[in-house]
Image (cartoon, rainbow, N blue to C red):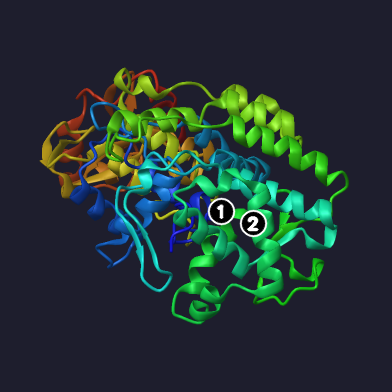
Amino acid sequence: MIFFNVPSVGQTKPETIFGQDDHFGFIQTLIGEKYNRENIRLKCQEYYNTDNPRYWDQIITLINFLGIKKLNLENEFEDISLLNVIAEKYDSNDLSPSKALFDYYLCMWQFPHPISTTTRAVNDSKLGLYVDNPRKFPITKPYAVILKLLLKLFKESPSKAYLSNEEFYWLGYYFYKTSGDSNKNIDQLFDYIIDIRKNGWDKFNKIRDLDGTATHLSYPKGFLRNSYVLSTDNDLYGINKNDFFIGFKQIENIENHISILINLTESLQFNFDHERSVRDVALCYDFTTYLYDKNKFKKWLNETGYYDINHNLLENVVNVEREFKLVDIARKKVEIQMTRLVNLDRKTITRQRTEQHLLRNYLFKHKKQGECAICNNEYPISFLATAHIKKRTKCTDQEKKDVNVVMPACHLGCDKVYEDGYVIVEDGVIKNNITSKPSTRDLRTFITSITDKKCKYYKKETAKYFKYHAKQYN
């Protein structure tokens, strides 16, 4: 059984999106491209270095749930500025913004979900459960329901402010059984929980040991673990670890915290026409825009006060999405990804892309042939190097991430003679710089053939790198 559309793939936590799995990093490589499922599948395999051709089909559930696949009306991937800022902080080991974001997700969590909730029937014969079309359910905020129920249990006795696995399983079952209406009556839910504690829930006992039951519970539990006020520590309540689902943390003024969260959660509701398809591009775009509105996030931060975050951080969040119609998309994509490379010289990095690969993509992607910046001759891409204008070993980390630090140079000689300073570029013109370097007649003939040619990669942005190179060999 899927609990309120929480994806049953990976754990819904910051590390999955920004860290080890880096699903957000993969989405960033797609900005500006059309969403073609087969094409994306292949790119996904390449990015994650996996032989599984269906890996994209697996992670898409998580990506849709968090609304990070933002497609414009032309069905092209667009950037999400808020996530860029949070990802950059995550990569610099400032984890507070990402923790706050996932806590915020809990308040934004709703069922039906505009992208994840399909019209497919829920049919579980073991539970005697059949629901025709869950997309037609009234909108429910699961986090608010859980908080209200725990608060009512807390008021009866702080020692009762938890849910067992059995009770949460029942909560999901009863939600579907009553087509979502049951969660409006917290008093009734409370009475049922008390009854379960006295008499048990027979249906859960019959299925608890079946394959997948515990696994399915781990996904909503993992998502709720992002909460500032909830804990999965069974020792707080003296409950067997295998039976404990979640409960309140022991926080001062917990009732006040919960009341604020409930009010916030219930006010954050994305209303949509339930007849619209999950594949409706405009609906998906509107949901993502709603979800990642910096003003909503800022309000959440201010009203909860849980995270020590410099609010100037959010001033860097701008509505950049439409800029992709006005700028070089390929360049923008590479620049975004470059900022996410933490340690450029590690043998293995979390991200599957090194900066050299990104720079090569920038120079040659979608091209079958290209022009050498030194001799101006055209060759197949395999004959062209991604040559650093300023030696990479001399570059700062920031310069290594600059798309202007490289140019295409052919393997037929230009890459080597430039790298070793046999030629330099002055004011955009190739100059002979062989001087007293070791040479042969054939090498001098080659250098003479390219001397005084214009370098098309000489421009305002690259001039400083050419100047540095020339100074090193003069």
Disc with the residue nearer the chain's start (2 vs 1): 1
Is residue 345 at all visible to an observer of this figure?
A: no
Residue drawn where x is 51% and y is 82% of the image:
209
Is residue 212 at all visible to an observer of this figure?
A: yes
Q: Is residue 306 above or below residue 82?
A: below
Residue 273 coordinates in the image, percent (x, y): 35, 30
Please tell me whether mark 1 sits on a helix, a strand or a loop: loop
Q: Quadrant of residue 136?
A: top left
Relative horizontal placement of residue 265, taking residue 180 as reference (left or right):
right
Q: Which three-letter amino acid code belongs to the residue tagged 1?
A: Lys
Contact flag, marks 2 and 1 (Cβ < 8 Å): yes
Q: Which three-letter amino acid code belongs to the residue tagged 2?
A: Arg
Q: Quadrant of residue 156?
A: bottom right
Tell me the number on the disc at residue 13: 1
Residue 242 coordinates in the image, percent (x, y): 65, 77
Residue drawn where x is 33% and y is 21% of the image:
327
